[in-house]
Image (cartoon, helix red, strand yellow):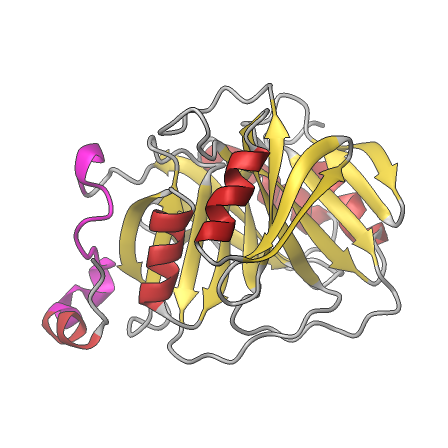
Amino acid sequence: MTLPILGLHHVTSKSSDPRQTDRFWRDVMGLRRIKQTVNFDNPKVYHLYYGNPAAEPGTVMTYFPFPALERGTRGTGEVRAVSFSIPTGSVDYWEATLSAAGVSGLVQDHLFGATCLNFAAPDGDEFQLVERNDDPRAGHSPTAIRGFDGVTLSLADIGATAEVLETFGYQRSAVEGNTTRFSLPNANGAGHVDLEASPDLPQAVEGAGSVHHVAFAVKDRAAQAQVREAMLAMGQRVTHVYDRDYFHAIYFRTDGGVLFEVATYEPGFDVDEDMASLGEALKLPTQHEHLRQKLEQELVPLT
């Protein structure tokens, strides 16, 4: 049975400063802020979403910015790096742009044969810009980020996570050193998951600069239910369905330690505001709407 996974939906990380996070992803990386809302479980903390002009799943980087949060410690059981797709021939432009902005960790390299640029976000989280000539997703300029290329997971043992990915429909497509690439045929553009076997590293400690979870995309709730049943049959401890306003979500933590989410395309990020004005106003989950006046006074204003 082939499960209806479409690729990545979003990646959610933690950071230490909402304004710094907002400036970096909008002004430096050129992504659109498509939603400013709050953490469902902690409404005193923003949940900020950044994506391509069309706000498409598979392009959306999101953050929980906890003010003054200590940095996480790198190790196994985490998403070590997130990669974005950029047009072929644009890596030099991006190196110059990020260097001028004071971005650290800039190194040109190759990732499974593709030219890429490694760099670090303000809290030390690791990213890569990967040149691709086969990405039809829209950016706001000829050199702009198109969306996710994939993620790299650092694991003590890749076996159990590989089994989940293969059940999702991913196929082993290449190996470089201690890293095995899993690729999803006919993905939404965000079709790579790389599993890095690092048994000698300590367990990662989550903090600022750490990925909280990686979300995989499905079309709708019927497809999500199919994935949920398959994961339960594998022995995964899968949550019930959560209504996250812009998508429905289920979660389970893989044996490798990484929290996976499966999120629907529907209803979409424009369900509560016009596409042209996404991300401009503070949108609150229904259960937190009664806190609006208080939150608007306490949350750090964004530009």
Residue 203, how many percent across, how many down?
75, 73
Q: Quadrant of the C terminus?
A: bottom left
Q: In the image, is 9 to the left or to the right of 172?
A: left
In this view of the protein, can residue 128 be seen by the observer?
yes
Seen as rendered, the residue at the extreme left is 293
Residue 6, how many percent across, how many down?
56, 30
Residue 213, how many percent across, how many down?
56, 57
Q: Please give the name of the residue rendered at 22% of the width and 72% of the height, measured from the top-left corner.
A: 299
Q: Please give the name of the residue rendered at 40% of the width and 28% of the height, measured from the top-left corner.
A: 139
Q: In the image, is 193 to the left or to the right of 124?
A: right
Q: From the viewer's perspective, is residue 286 above or below residue 128?
A: below
Q: Nearer the viewer, residue 269 or 181?
A: 181
Q: Please give the name of the residue rendered at 18% of the width and 72% of the height, measured from the top-left corner.
A: 295
Q: Please give the name of the residue rendered at 51% of the width and 71% of the height, measured from the top-left corner.
A: 208
Q: From the viewer's perspective, is residue 44 above or below residue 185?
A: below
Where residue 285 sits, quadrant-wise, is bottom left
Residue 278 sits inside the magenta stretch? yes
Residue 147 sits inside the magenta stretch? no
Magenta stretch bounds: 273-292
Q: Nearer the viewer, residue 212 or 40?
A: 212
Q: In the image, is 190 to the left or to the right of 27?
A: right
Q: From the viewer's perspective, is residue 117 above or below residue 300?
A: above
Q: Quadrant of the N terminus?
A: top right
Residue 103, how many percent across, how many down?
51, 57
Q: How many marks?
A: 0
In this view of the protein, can residue 169 be seen by the observer?
no
Q: Nearer the viewer, residue 240 or 37?
A: 37
Where residue 236 sits, quadrant-wise, is bottom right
